[in-house]
Amino acid sequence: MHASSPKAKAREPEAYALFLQARDIGEQHTPLAYEQSISLYRQALELDPGYAEAWDGLANTYGYLGIDSIWRSDEAFRLASEAALRALALD
């Protein structure tokens, strides 16, 4: 009996490109980079709402906004938690 190998999920190419851009820009760790990253993650999620990795990236970005005191921590962490729970529900 062979265990089945994990199946890669098909992704909308444009959503994947937006995800990569969002992740790369967010690595700059500046207020503007975080805002741009959030916008790109949201665009990716408009194209593919089931994209768990994009929800995870969005959660991380919101978390950084709270950690770096760019946004009020309660709001940033609430949004981070919502996005993280969405990612977990999907994958």
Image (tube, rainbow, N blue to C red):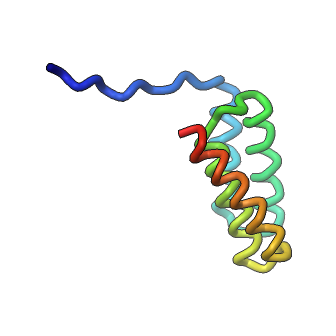
Q: Quadrant of residue 11?
A: top right
Please identify the residue farthest to the left as the structure is shown.
1
- Check the image and report above or below for 19 versus 75: above
Q: Is residue 66 left or right of residue 84?
A: right
Residue pictured at 71% horizontal, 60% vertical? 80
- Check the image and report above or below for 80 versus 58: below
Q: Foreground residue, 17 or 2?
A: 2
Quarter of the image that includes the N terminus: top left
- Check the image and report above or below for 68 versus 85: below
Residue 6: x, y in percent? 36, 28
**Visible residue check, residue 3:** yes
Residue 81: x, y in percent? 69, 60
Q: Foreground residue, 32 or 39?
A: 39
Residue pictured at 80% horizontal, 74% vertical? 74
Residue 22: x, y in percent? 70, 48
**Visible residue check, residue 24:** no
Please identify the residue farthest to the bottom as the structure is shown.
69
Q: Foreground residue, 7 or 91?
A: 91
How many tags in the picture? 0
Residue pictured at 70% horizontal, 52% vertical? 83
Residue 62: x, y in percent? 74, 62
